[in-house]
Image: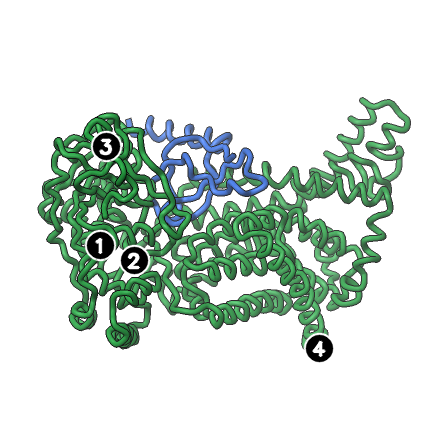
Amino acid sequence: MPALVARREHCPLCGIEFDAEGQGCRPSCPMSKGCKVLCCPGCGYSFPQETGLAGGLRRFFDRRKERRET
Amino acid sequence: MSASAASCHGSKTELDQKKVIAGTRSLILVGNPNVGKSVVFGALTGKYVTVSNYPGTTVEVTRGSATLAGEPWHVMDTPGTNGIMPMSEDEQVTRDILILERDYVCLQVCDAKNLRRGLLLSAQLAEAQVPFLLALNMADEAASRGIEIDADRLASELGVDVFPTVAVQRQGLSAVSAKAAEARRSTFLPRYDDAIEAALGEVIPLMPRQGGIAPRSVAVMALVGDESLRQHLAANLSAEALARVDEVGRKLAARYPESLRFVVSKQRLAAVDRLINAVMRKKGQVSTGSSFGRRLGNYATHPVWGVPFLAGVLFVCYEFVGVFGAKVAVDFLENQIFYARLVPWFDRAIRFVVPAGGVQTFLVGPLGVPFREHSGLLVGKYGLFSMGLSYGMAIVLPIVTTFFIAFSILEDSGYLPRLAVMVNRVFKRMGLNGKAVLPMVLGLGCDTMATMTARIMETRKERVIVTLLLALGVPCSAQLAVIFSMLAGLSPGATAWFAGSIILVLFLVGWLAAKVIPGRGSDFMLELPPLRMPQASNILIKTTARIEWYLREALPLFVLGTAILWGLDRVNGLALLERAAAPVVVGILHLPKEAASAFILGFLRRDYAAAGLFMHYEPFMKAGTMTREMRIEVVVALTTITLFIPCIANFFMIIKERGWKTGAAVAGFILPFSVAVGAGVDALMRWLY
């Protein structure tokens, strides 16, 4: 099964926001175990979920932005 | 019939126990995908529900019961839809429910953060004259993002009740329940241009009067040539009336350069945008993009200026990926890092840990012999470290990294949806259905994902053809990156031969598909965000996410591929394979015999095959000693590999999505076809190049 983190995601193609849960793209793919690819329910665009190092970078930049704004 | 699934139940006691019973009235939940519709359904009905496939489809519809304002109701949850002019089987089911059910009211659940998408559906419910209520769900999240929606003004503009809700916390749902019985038909009626209104005036009187949605709405669908409505119209209209509708639709369509479906949606969207401007504000938002960004965005999708814009974007990508990534970065990583340092270090480390003798020789070969001249398992000609990891980390990784950076810039700048619009135009000229754009563009990322996206196509035939085209002629990101790098070592003429061959094949197959598929093509609709300056942090994060995905997915297969090569080499299987494939590889395609193993292992990963070829020709490209013969070989090999059978993941996906027969048929067609095209390109180039 796809290994997605349940959270809100933003489609980089059509811009809609959606729940990552249940939006794993490839349950039938032989490599779906541990797969982090999401499929947008609005337009079908696929992209990897930002977890691991990318997730860490996202949190870092978000925190920096927050600090700057406050 | 509003409660067919529950007609055999019916006491108040059962209702109290939240079992499915026959309510006196029906409430149908509609909404875009992923807006919290099922949460609302669960909150209204409790856990005792029935889930069944909608007749004649594999689409699930959930039914339950609820007590709303003291009255028993039958509640139905429909598949998520973006409109009632269906673009997929799911959407068709929702549309058919609205047409076939009687005496119902709708509860539209809308994501308050994506109001434009939600109101586009509201406009269609209004046109259908369906009594409905609007729940602006996830209102808390919208507010936290600075989105302010004037619900009272929206209710007044739409002429229906509007409720901000937070379904997961059950906020606002009691107000929805209390007002369900008072749902009204909306007074918000989008008007189209004079020609469409005149055509509607002619067609509306011919439309069937029975049905859950208004004749005007059915007439719009009939005029745009909605094939999924054909059966309903044929059953309810005389042959003369049906012919008249078709004739009016044809005449109307001839007035516009775009399809009628697109024109209708565009005009409807304009009405929705005016409504949004009146009811929604976003804190801190000055405009939807700078005027320069808007102008640039318009150029990017302009029928004339969009083409040089696209060519410019592709040229910059090619220079960055093919020249910088494939030459500078690969040369540095492969020669300076991998072969000059990492491989010798690893070799020494193994010799230090493993005592001299048979095991050491088995792992890293005899001491003092260059690794390309022995068959060590870890370090050797086909060593897991010296070949598998060097392919994955030193050759393909720098190329895909530059490709992912370029792709992330396109994505973050908002150009990607515009690229889809431009490609849509090209595809339509090729005779392909407009909706095929998304799977085809996605195929440039990963064909396996794109094969699954082919589900959005309406008919089985369309899905099979998109699947075939994806498997046949659309290179995935990793393969495309290696192709870019090889093309960078060729002359512009040879590059044109390769690109021309692939485009011609896609064009011909697309043209044949257009001949085979009956009916009119459907459209691809995508909201275009404003063009904006890409953010360095976003590009870094997106590229990192893709590299992580690539490393997780590709590296194990590169190591497995190398292990297979090593095993074959140990039992002399490679020579056998090369001899067996020689009639095709050498005899027909006039390629070096070593290309046979690249072709066969390309089944594991397409880029593995391309990387093998890259390794073979790289020294000549770097030295600038590529002969005419070699350039022809590279173009023939790249053409054949691009058209060759898909990778193992894509092949399994085709089997899962389309069945064994289709999977075997696709592979059975592609294998000889790719060789035939390769042979054709070879013959033509030797004659004309």
Return the x and y of residue B328 as percentages of the image width and height: 63, 48
Q: Chain of mark 1?
A: B
Local crowd size for mark 2, using a 10 Å CA cut-off: few (<14), some (14–19), many (≥20): many
Above or below B226: residue B352: above
Return the x and y of residue B481 as percentages of the image width and height: 59, 52
**Circle 4 or circle 3, nearest the eye:** 3
Which numbered disc, 3 or 2, marks the residue that appears first in the sequence? 3
Q: Which mark is residue B112?
A: none
Q: Amino acid at mark 3?
A: Leu
Return the x and y of residue B396 as percentages of the image width and height: 63, 46
Q: Chain of mark 2?
A: B
Which chain shows up in green?
B
Q: Amino acid at mark 2?
A: Met
Which chain shows up in blue?
A
The quadrant where residue B110 appears: top left
Q: Count every numbered label the image shows and give the total.
A: 4
Local crowd size for mark 4, using a 10 Å CA cut-off: few (<14), some (14–19), many (≥20): few
Return the x and y of residue B324 as percentages of the image width and height: 59, 50
Q: Which residue is mark 3?
A: B44
The reply to whether label 3 and label 2 mark residues of one chain is yes
Q: Which residue is mark 4?
A: B687
Would residue B582 appear left or right of B392 to someone viewing this image? right
**Circle 4 or circle 1, nearest the eye:** 1
How far apart, in angstroms, are the residues tagged by discs 3 and 2?
28 Å
Q: Which residue is mark 2?
A: B85
Is there CB contact under 8 Å for labels 1 and 2? yes
Q: Chain of mark 4?
A: B
The reply to whether label 4 and label 3 mark residues of one chain is yes
**Circle 3 or circle 1, nearest the eye:** 3
Looking at the image, which is closer to me, B669 or B180?
B180
Q: Which residue is mark 1?
A: B124
Would residue B348 appear left or right of B255 to someone viewing this image? right
